Each structure stands twice: as structure tokens, then as C-alpha cells.
Image (spheres, grey):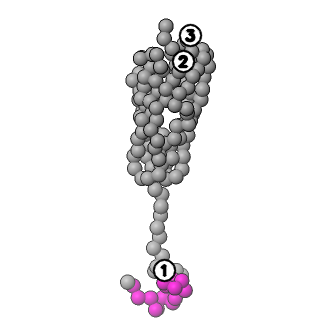
């Protein structure tokens, strides 16, 4: 017999790992997904969680998790983009003593900027335009750029 631990959470494709798409978010916002490890086997198990530090993802889990038979432990994966574009990071989960339970999950997400700039230097208003000094100036004095 070998230790056996299941990964709980959002659907991840394939037996050899897969992808966890955390979505498209504005910069500095966050999306959090709760996941869990559960010992479904007959033996106590230790799970190794491998995650390299990332400015875009946080995995709130110890690198080594000991679970007795029937025990489970929850943890969070958080996406918080700090730059525009698609980003990825790998999350490895391995049950020690069981070579069949070694998966790599590719965390994916996309950061985007929702900045808006307005050029109000010569905005036309009823009765005049706002000049560069912010005063309402009569239309007859307005000269197009």
C-alpha cells in the first residue's frame, strides 16, 4: 500500500496536471480560489507543495503537509497581477512515497489596465470653451488649434 492524497478545488484537466485559469483582472485587484488536500488512503501521508515566489500569484500553503487517514487541509491560491499581460507560474503537488501522485499545475492569469486619459484642453461648452487656465472663454475668442 502507498499513501494517497486527492486535490480538491476547481476542475483541473488531465492526470498529469493541468491549468488553473485565474481570469483577467485589473492591475492590483485579486482573485482567490480555495483548494484542498485530502488523505483518502489507508496510510498517513505527507504532501510536498512546491511553488516559487511570484509577484502575481500567492499560494498560502506550507511546503510540507502531513495528513492522517481521512484528514484534509485547505489552502488558497491568489492571483494579483502587477503588470499588463498574461502571466504563468507552476504549482507542484507531490505525495511522498507515491510516484503516481506527482502533478504540476500551471497557474495562469492576465492583468490589464483600465486607465483612461481625457484631454480637456479645448472642450467646447455651451456659451464658450474652457481655456488652459480653466476659465470659461467666449466662443468668438476661440481659435482652433
Please state which of residues 98 and 77 is positioned toward the viewer in this rendering: 98
According to the picture, the residue beneath numbered tag 3 turns out to be 42
According to the picture, the residue beneath numbered tag 2 turns out to be 45
Label 2: few (<14), some (14–19) or many (≥20) C-alpha neighbours in 10 Å:
many
Above or below, 32 relative to 11: below
Q: Residue 117: where, in percent of width, then height?
A: 46, 67
Q: Residue 67: where, in percent of width, then height?
A: 58, 20
Is 132 contained in the magenta span? Answer: yes
Q: Mark 2: which secondary structure?
A: strand
Residue depicted at x 43% and y 22%: 102
Could you give the CA–CA distance between mark 3 and mark 1, rounded to whole angstroms?
77 Å
Instruction: Please tell me which of labels 3 and 1 falls first in the chain.
Output: 3
Evaluate whether residue 8 shows in this view: no
Could you give the CA–CA distance between mark 2 and mark 3, rounded to whole angstroms?
9 Å
Residue depicted at x 52% and y 52%: 28
Above or below, 72 relative to 58: above
Please state which of residues 135 and 115 is positioned toward the viewer in this rendering: 115
Residue depicted at x 45% and y 16%: 98
Q: Which mark is residue 60?
A: none
Evaluate whether residue 99 shows in this view: yes
Above or below, 36 relative to 42: below
Please state which of residues 132 and 7 is positioned toward the viewer in this rendering: 7
Q: Mark 1: which secondary structure?
A: strand
Question: Foreground mark, 3 or 1?
Answer: 3
Q: Mark 3: which secondary structure?
A: loop
Could you give the CA–CA distance between mark 1 and mark 2, rounded to whole angstroms?
71 Å
Q: Are marks 1 and 2 in contact (CB under 8 Å)?
A: no
Image quadrant containing the C terminus: bottom left
Q: Residue 76: where, in percent of width, then height?
A: 56, 35
According to the picture, the residue beneath numbered tag 1 turns out to be 124
Q: Which residues are magenta?
A: 129-144
Amino acid at each position: 500500500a502507498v499513501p494517497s492524497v486527492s486535490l480538491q478545488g476547481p476542475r483541473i484537466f488531465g492526470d498529469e496536471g493541468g491549468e488553473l485559469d485565474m481570469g483577467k483582472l485589473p492591475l492590483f485587484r485579486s482573485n482567490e480560489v480555495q483548494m484542498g488536500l485530502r488523505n483518502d488512503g489507508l496510510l498517513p501521508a505527507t504532501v510536498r507543495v512546491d511553488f516559487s515566489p511570484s509577484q502575481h500569484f500567492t499560494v498560502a500553503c506550507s511546503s510540507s503537509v502531513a495528513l492522517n487517514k481521512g484528514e484534509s487541509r485547505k489552502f488558497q491560491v491568489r492571483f494579483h497581477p502587477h503588470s499588463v499581460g498574461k502571466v504563468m507560474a507552476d504549482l507542484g503537488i507531490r505525495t511522498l512515497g507515491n510516484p503516481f501522485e506527482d502533478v504540476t499545475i500551471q497557474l495562469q492569469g492576465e492583468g490589464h489596465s483600465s486607465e483612461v486619459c481625457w484631454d480637456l484642453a479645448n472642450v467646447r461648452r455651451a456659451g464658450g470653451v474652457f481655456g488652459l487656465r480653466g476659465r470659461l472663454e467666449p466662443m468668438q475668442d476661440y481659435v482652433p488649434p
